[in-house]
């Protein structure tokens, strides 16, 4: 099983050393710890055959009882694993500090290690806490090592947006231990930095990214991305560069390449614009009773929320049978008069940003008259224009009140029409 101890005290997140930026520094001085597991933050005691603190990472100010010595390079407090018993197979990890913002760093430390046989190892990695992956620093194996300075070694390819820790894992079969001291991580480069702004073009279901760059050590940069190489921008320089467009919903990771220009690289966090309406407009559609004489009816569209995306909508368009009926209306009720029939009505919000479309679901509006009673007589033109054809198969013999005296057969189903007679001329019906 793997054991962990987190050492987070005494580290530095900034500072200058011989022109280098100090990313992390840890010599364990000032960290007072006992030798029992309970005093060493969090340790997994599950190492096979191990029983007690000696086989696990701890902080001490003296050489442990092991065959590895570190008197010259190590001083004061140091992190150690001691010999604890002949049945103990150590497998335990020391986690030191955390940092972010760098694509390339130099790692150095002082150490001593008891290494016997091919199975014993001291493994050192930079661990990406964001992606939970490791970038190797070194593997120490083969022979015992005393009073040794691991020289500054450059580790490239880090993601400057992610958080890293330095981890030391000692894997050994009941060996005499290891010592670590004077850990130093520095960066020889101040990476380019940038702020980004999404520029939506959701009418066309796409977006671009404005990248505002500060070069720092680089004299220029290339702006690349992982979504569409044709949108890369060479020699972008400082200031704002627009990258894109990209299809809506695409995750885009921007990289600032300063390495070709005497600097280093930086990778930005993923950006996207879904062009999705985050708040759907709210509208109620009501069909009013028809005017059977005119053959029309009113549709009430009551808008109570205009909806929106990145920004709120400022108005709405009302569509009837996919045709724009009323444009840029506000909250409240809009009345639309239509001939008796069945219609599909929806409301589209406008004026906001961050979406391709922002519409309500389709709603139905319908009304009609059967004109099988006198009071619902259809009005017809007197110039010969044909009236709308009707299906009278479902008409019934309905009492017609004051119109009954016009019927020659009161037991017959009927359809009623009316017209307005002109003051002169002919009537053509």
Image (cartoon, rainbow, N blue to C red):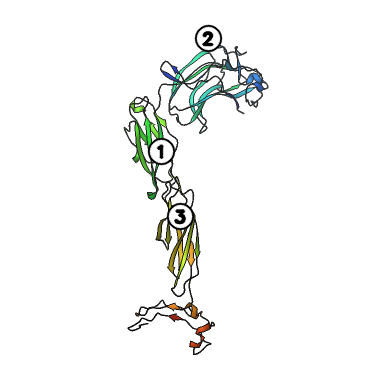
**In the rendered view, would you say 84 is above or below 350?**
above
Mark 3 nearby-residue class (10 Å; few <14, some 14–19, many ≥20): many
- Of residues 331 and 363, which is closer to you in this image? 331
Q: Quadrant of the N terminus?
A: top right
| Distance in Å between CA atoms under marks 3 and 1 | 26 Å
- Of residues 254 and 355, which is closer to you in this image? 355
Label 2 belongs to which residue?
Answer: 72
Q: Is residue 172 left or right of residue 325?
A: right
Mark 1 nearby-residue class (10 Å; few <14, some 14–19, many ≥20): few
- Of residues 363 and 192, which is closer to you in this image? 363
Residue for point 42% across, 60% down: 319
- The answer to whether any part of residue 87 appears in the image is no
Q: Label 2, secondary structure: give it.
A: loop
Residue farthest to the bottom, as pictured: 408
| Distance in Å between CA atoms under marks 1 and 2 | 53 Å
Q: Label 1, secondary structure: give it.
A: strand
- The answer to whether any part of residue 309 appears in the image is yes
**In the rendered view, would you say 93 is above or below 346?**
above
Of badges 1 and 2, the one in the foreground is 1
Residue for point 46% across, 81% down: 416
Q: Is residue 106 left or right of residue 9?
A: left
Residues at marks 3 and 1 touching, judged by CB atoms closer than 8 Å = no
- Sequence-wise, the earlier of marks 2 and 3 is 2
Label 3 belongs to which residue?
Answer: 359
Q: Label 3, secondary structure: give it.
A: loop
Residues at marks 2 and 3 touching, judged by CB atoms closer than 8 Å = no
Which percent across, then down, holds residue 415? 47, 81
Q: Quadrant of residue 390?
A: bottom left
The tally of labels here is 3
């Amino acid at each position: 099983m793997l054991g962990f101890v987190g050492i987070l005290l005494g580290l530095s997140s900034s500072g200058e050393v011989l022109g280098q930026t100090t990313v992390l520094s840890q010599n364990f001085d000032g960290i007072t710890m006992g030798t029992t597991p309970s005093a060493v933050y969090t340790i997994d005691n599950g190492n096979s055959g191990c029983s007690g603190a000696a086989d696990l990472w701890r902080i001490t100010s003296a050489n442990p009882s092991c065959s590895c010595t570190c008197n010259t390079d190590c001083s004061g407090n140091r992190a150690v694993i001691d010999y604890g018993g002949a049945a103990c197979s150590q497998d335990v990890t020391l986690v030191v500090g955390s940092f972010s913002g760098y694509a390339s760093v130099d790692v150095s430390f002082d150490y001593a290690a008891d290494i016997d046989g091919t199975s014993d190892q001291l493994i050192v990695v930079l661990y990406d806490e964001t992606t939970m992956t490791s970038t190797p620093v070194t593997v120490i194996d083969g022979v015992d090592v005393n009073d040794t300075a691991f020289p500054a070694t450059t580790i490239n390819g880090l993601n400057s947006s992610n958080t890293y820790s330095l981890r030391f894992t000692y894997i050994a079969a009941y060996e005499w231990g290891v010592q670590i001291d004077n850990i130093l991580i520095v960066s020889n480069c101040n990476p380019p930095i940038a702020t980004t702004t999404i520029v939506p073009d959701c009418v066309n279901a796409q977006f671009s990214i404005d990248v505002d760059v500060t070069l720092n050590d680089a004299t220029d940069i290339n702006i690349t991305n992982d979504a569409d190489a044709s949108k890369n921008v060479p020699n972008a320089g400082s200031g704002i560069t627009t990258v894109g467009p990209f299809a809506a919903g695409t995750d885009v990771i921007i990289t600032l390449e300063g390495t070709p220009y005497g600097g280093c690289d930086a990778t930005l966090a993923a950006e996207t614009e879904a062009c999705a309406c985050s708040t759907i407009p709210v509208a109620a559609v009501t069909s009013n009773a028809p005017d059977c004489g005119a053959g029309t009816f009113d549709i009430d569209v009551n808008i109570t929320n205009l909806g929106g995306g990145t920004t709120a909508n400022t108005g709405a368009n009302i569509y009837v049978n996919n045709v724009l009926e009323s444009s840029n209306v506000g909250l409240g009720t809009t009345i639309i008069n239509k001939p008796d029939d069945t219609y599909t009505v929806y409301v589209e919000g406008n004026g906001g940003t961050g979406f391709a479309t922002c519409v309500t679901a389709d709603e139905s509006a319908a009304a009609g008259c059967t004109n099988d009673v006198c009071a619902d007589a259809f009005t017809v033109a007197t110039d010969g224009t044909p009236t709308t054809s009707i299906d009278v198969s479902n008409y019934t013999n309905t009492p017609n009140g004051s119109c009954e005296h016009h019927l020659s057969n009161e037991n017959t189903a009927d359809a009623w029409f009316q017209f307005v007679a002109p003051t002169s001329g002919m009537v053509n019906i």
